[in-house]
Image (tube, grey):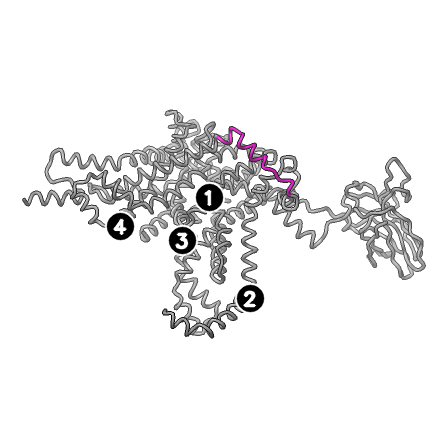
Amino acid sequence: MTTAELEAQAPGAREETTSARLVRYLSKTPVYLFLAFLGLLWLVPTLGLFFTSLLQPSVVGTSGWWEILSEPSLGTLDNYREILDNEAITSALLTTLWVSLGATILPIFLAALAAYAFAWLEFPGRDWLFLIVVALLVVPIQMALIPIFSLYNDLGLFDTILGLILFHTAFGLPFAIFLLRNFFIGIPKDLLEAARIDGASEMRIFLRLILPLGLPAVASLAIFQFLWVWNDLLVALTFARDTQPITVAIFSQMRQFSANIEIIAPAAFVSLAIPLAVFFAFQRYFVEGLLAGSVK
Amino acid sequence: MSESVTEAEALARGLPPDDEGPGIWQRYGVVALFLGPALVLLAVWVVYPTIRTIIRSFYDRSGDEFIGLDNYQTLFSDDTLLTAIRNNVLWLLIVPALVTAIGLVFAVLLERVRFSVAFKVAVFMPMAISLFAAGVIWRLMYEKDPDQGTVNAAIAVVKDAVSPSGVLSAAQPSTDALEGGPRGGLVLKTPLAAGGVAQLGLTGIRSSDVPADAEQAVVPEPLQGGITGVVWRDFKPGGGTAGEVEDEELGLPGVTVELRDDSGRSVLDTRTEADGTFAFEEVEAGSYRPAIGPDTFSEPFAGVSWLGASLITPAIMLSYIWVWAGFAMVVIAAGLAAIPRDLLEAARTDGATERQVFRRVTIPLLAPVLTVVFITMLIYVLKVFDIVIAVAPGSVQDDANVIALAMWRTSFGGINDFGLGAAIAVFLFLLVIPILAVNIRRFRREV
């Protein structure tokens, strides 16, 4: 639209739309109010945990978290200081961090390698093998718990960070391979052929060409896998005893829930602050990952 | 020359060259290098355990004796496990449908307004939180004591607005001049006529329960043609005479006093003043018995025990819906945005009402998206574990049980029966396969 057109249209049209807009907004006030109410309703539980985590230990058993709103003096940061001094909690956070990083980088790298082979190398039985790998998506984690528990006891992998990483890696692979292979296959064939004719090795093509081109897919996969592992309870509860991730550390406090609220609440809040930050930073990758995650 | 062309071609396609020799092995070596690590991990951590678990499910607890289908028989006869299966069926029937419906409502509401980002973020945020942390959050929300549990506190506020709890829930009569109980109220034994004065003494009231505006109790003067009286706390620190209004004894304000006729019907009622006095000014001839109304003694709201055996499953479902509604909303909203405007406009021009447009045009066009959300939820719900183990206290985990939780508890949570645990895992596996088959087919179509 040119400026002339804009000017010609402007005076009358703008006046009309302003009043019309006002009417429209007013007629929608109930919807806005309802949405505001719902939004608040959805926020309350998380805020409740946060304010509970701030309650002084002396009042935590007698006061509700909402009292902190009218009486801010009930709040304290001591609970957070306390858990950051608590060696069991800090080492659990570190364990979670290492497991999450390891179980994100390793499966994605291995899956990218395999996906490249499935997409761009030719060998007999390729499509067949790919189908089998995709079919492994249906295996629920529960199917592996018992035999791996015995295997880990024999191999000394029980209660180790490596054991947790390998388990998450294996169960992250089928989906990662599936997704990356479908992404890689969309990369223009000419690029690859040109590189091959130039005499580049497959590994070089993979590292220099395919991985950079596949970065969007890799990124969304990485975010989802990281959160998946960070938030895991089932695997950690089964294979960790002393080297426990934060979810297990909190879980073990929950046997005496009311007595331990001043540890549970701040620890739970710290444990969800990281995923929350990741979520706010990368919102748009999130939904895709969740849709895909159902096949895990 | 021609040979070098084919070689280049083969090279470009990643094919092993035609000729035998070191080339072909080098080619397969490359394939092995790329595929090997992933395949080894999958074989050891996924394929082998799956086969092992299936075999293990036919053996007894120790793993030494083959017992055929006995574990599967136990699965369908053991009370705890049957509860788990029944609960999981309830989960499957209720939760995916509700999540999809709520997501649809939210998405449609969102369509109608601008500046909806804050709402979207608020509703979607629980998705980023782990189901376990969500469980911790809701365990707090569901505390029974209305002073602690948010849900019960909210109910208490509503309930107090509708029917306030009694002023004196634990009060007792101080002498046997009063009869009755908290249910029907306390009634004066001797009937009074106009001009009478009633003294209604109560004890068993903690100082903290005495209303703050209470003043020294006073026995009111008799009233011509009326009935007066006092309700007071008949308790004097350090002694005193029961049934007598004395110094330092407080009147009880805000108590409902009824005047009952011979048949026990309440004809008049009033409330006491700060000094505990009350008056019925114009009373018809006859004899009446004043009574302290039962609502004075109604217990304050003690809280719904959400975490008790009977409500635990609905309570957990509610928290689960809180987590997933945002997911459904975002996916369905994307679907809504993709519906061509002209289609809706065309329907409207043809004279369809908004409701008809929604039911006949929007919903059918949204069907694929709704199906995606529904199936995704089915799979997640089938394997629900973290939130159940987090919300349900140990004592009600038998009542809140679901298949995945039963599998874990049977195998690792103290019972340590790997045979039965394996059978439960296989059962879960069998349930997942048909849903996932549909999902993967959809996925392959899409990508």
Mark 3 is on which residue type? Val
Gap in angstroms between the C-alphas marked 1 and 2: 36 Å
- Quadrant into which the N terminus of chain B falls: top left
Gap in angstroms between the C-alphas marked 4 and 2: 49 Å
Q: Which residue is mark 4?
A: A186
Task: Give the mark nearest the N terminus, 4 or 1.
Answer: 4
Q: Which residue is mark 3?
A: B372
Give x and y (percent) for residue B5.
9, 45
Instruction: Specify the subunit that label 3 lies on.
Output: B
Give x and y (percent) for residue B95.
49, 50
Magenta stretch in the rendered image: A72-90
Q: Which residue is mark 2?
A: A26
Which of the two discs, 3 and 1, sits closer to the camera?
Answer: 1
Gap in angstroms between the C-alphas marked 3 and 4: 24 Å
Do the CB atoms of the residues marked 4 and 1 lie less than 8 Å apart? no
Give x and y (percent) for residue A77.
58, 37
Gap in angstroms between the C-alphas marked 4 and 1: 32 Å
Q: Which residue is mark 1?
A: A277
Secondary structure of residue under mark 2: helix
